[in-house]
Amino acid sequence: MAAGGSLSRSERKAAARAELLQQEEQRDRRRQVGPRAPPRPPPGRAAVTRCVCRQVSRIWRKPPAERSPEECQVLSESDDIVRELERRRKRRERLRRRQEEVCDEPEELKRKAIELAAAVRNAKHLVIYTGAGISTAASIPDYRGPNGIWTLLQKGRSIRATDLSEAEPTLTHMSIACLHKHNLVQHVVSQNCDGLHLRSGLPRAAISELHGNMYIEVCTSCTPNREYVRVFDVTERTALHRHHTGRMCHKCGSQLRDTIVHFGEKGTLTQPLNWEAATEAASKADVILCLGSSLKVLKKYPRLWCMSKPPTRRPKLYIVNLQWTPKDDLAALKLHGRCDDVMRLLMEELGLEIPSYDRARDPIFALAEPLRPGEEGTHSRKPVAPPPGTEPPREEPRQEPPPPARPGGWLGRGCAKGARRRKSN
């Protein structure tokens, strides 16, 4: 081999084994085909390495009792490859365990809820961080659960379209609003774009929606930015780095944009992101309660974790999630349970009644800005509507039947883009 002088002893052995295997394959091919084929050029260094790795991997996957003495000899001469295979196996196993959902036994969950209730009562400044897990009870998929968006896409499966207009605030949303009303929670920081915190009755000033709100579009040409709350998903025409919604500002005539912060983007809007209030709340917090979040994104925001403070002065952390999170080792208490189940136990222990959601009194109807004449055809999303027999939302009725709603928006478009990118790699 031309590069033989630069190969190590183990690599020369591997090259020799690869050459023997190639000669055997050529002999088998001649027996089957007949006339002798022209000899192939000697394999390069990379090809030899790949061939040896495949051979070692095939042997390594066999049960030890089924390996021949020759195969055992190959493994003993390829320690570096075997170590790499073992490292990858342990990593896959670790990732698999982290994706598993673990539920505490009812008695254990009750005990932890009592401990959490004591922390809530004694907290001087409690801040709640919420993720997609609090909205799964509203039939909105999460991202990293067993049936989450990223999980399904990684398995090569498609995601179904979700009618977000039918989603309603869950028991967890209503419990959080109740805790804020009783001054037990000072601020809520949410990763969710579904707008359910707003619809639960939580005041705008008490929410930081770090990744935007699907019901809000803004004019960035006005000072301060002018907000338009709608009763439909405004993100139908928007995507990564493309945020114009197709409607115009009623005051200055500039294009409106959505408020969604996609993966790979940096949020710059003042509202509804409300980063200033989130940072201030985190700096004052003595207790942080994380509900339904994997924390894989939130952990990247140092301002939310008071990392500049000494560890003894940082807020106590309580986590409610079925899966592993990167903050588990720092938590004072981890509750393995569904958010609605934990919040039901917590509110019972605190002696507070969980208010029921009443769609007729949904705050979005009072906040919504009606479309102007000529804007009715700028969206095909189904609007949030009050129950039959109650006052309809202020949006003008559509004169023509809407076209079939196409999948997309902040939920579908981003996922489809991610699927295409993985497929092309």
Image (cartoon, rainbow, N blue to C red):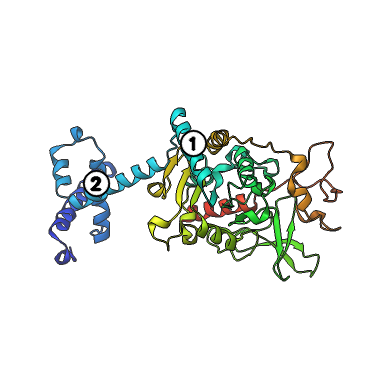
**Secondary structure type for disc 2:** helix
Q: Which sits in the foreground, 230 or 302?
A: 302
Q: In this view, does 114 lie to the left or right of 277?
A: left
Q: In this view, does 244 lie to the left or right of 19?
A: right
Q: Return the x and y of residue 150 as percentages of the image width and height.
A: 50, 47
**Secondary structure type for disc 1:** helix
Tell whether label 2 touches label 1 (CB within 8 Å). no
Res. 220 mark: none
Q: In this view, does 16 lie to the left or right of 124?
A: left
Q: Which sits in the foreground, 69 or 268?
A: 268
Q: Return the x and y of residue 227 as percentages of the image width and height.
A: 73, 61
Quadrant occupied by the C terminus: bottom left
Q: Mark 2 points at which residue?
A: 55
Q: Nearer the viewer, mark 1 or mark 2?
A: 1
The residue drawn where x is 23% and y is 59% is 42
Q: Name the residue under label 1.
A: 113
Q: Which sits in the foreground, 156 or 129?
A: 129
Q: Return the x and y of residue 153 as percentages of the image width and height.
A: 51, 46
> The disc labelled 2 sits on which kind of residue?
Gln
Q: Return the x and y of residue 81 as percentages of the image width and height.
A: 23, 51
What separation in Å lies between label 1 and label 2 (alpha carbons)? Answer: 53 Å
- Categorize mark 2 by other alpha carbons within 10 Å: few (<14), some (14-19), many (20+): some
> The disc labelled 1 sits on which kind of residue?
Ala
The residue drawn where x is 51% and y is 48% is 123
